[in-house]
Image (cartoon, grey):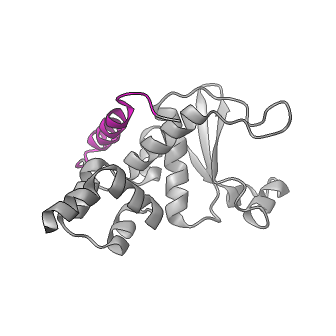
Amino acid sequence: MSLRHGFKAEANRLAVQMRKELGLHPASPLAPARLAEHLAIPVKTFSSAIAHDARIGRLLAGEREAVSALTVHAGARREIWVNDSHDPGRQNSSADHEIAHALLMHPPGPALDLHGCRHWDGEIEEEADWLAGNLLITNEAAWSIARRSTGPEEAMLQYGVSRSMLTWRMNMSGARGRRIRSAS
């Protein structure tokens, strides 16, 4: 699947705009919790729901890879639920993926199809993935990381991301190539 023409640039502009609304520099880290609060979207953790529903406990134990995060819709309201048994970088990516759906005004859909299988709209999921990456590390942030020769561990900690997200954003933003060219 490929993103519509211009979407990648639009996603970065939206991620920069969110920082601007919060008084941040385009290259500044932006915690998903802060963005969710700004957008009036409550973020809750699976472990906070265990007392109310034993099925959630299974997601944190034997089936912890089954769900990373989800959005619950109640009319125009949204709540994001994050699987807090995952590492913090993955939790941030998962939360921003759900925030991306809200920012892109993706319509809610059924979680399961008629056969009980997970309903999947590849196009909107790809858009949410791309925007989530930009919300975590804008192009400007990736270029700043490269320009300052920030090590991966420091950048992961600063932006609250996993190594795979950092690598992906450095590659997709062109920052990795800029770093290689500037070192030559």
Which x, y percent locates residue 93? 50, 54
The residue at 86%/34% (across/down) is 115
Location of residue 86 (image quadrant): bottom right
Q: Nearer the viewer, residue 130 or 57?
A: 130
In the figure, is residue 48 to the left or right of 127? right
The residue at 52%/65% (across/down) is 88
The residue at 51%/27% (across/down) is 105
Which x, y percent locates residue 122? 60, 35
| Residue 131 in view in this figure | yes
Question: Any magenta on residue 19?
Answer: yes
In the figure, is residue 106 to the left or right of 18? right
| Residue 27 in view in this figure | no
In the figure, is residue 110 to the left or right of 153? right
The residue at 38%/32% (across/down) is 7
Q: Quadrant of the C terminus?
A: bottom left
Span shown in magenta: 3-25
Which x, y percent locates residue 183? 15, 68
* Prevailing SS of the magenta stretch: helix
Question: Any magenta on residue 159?
Answer: no
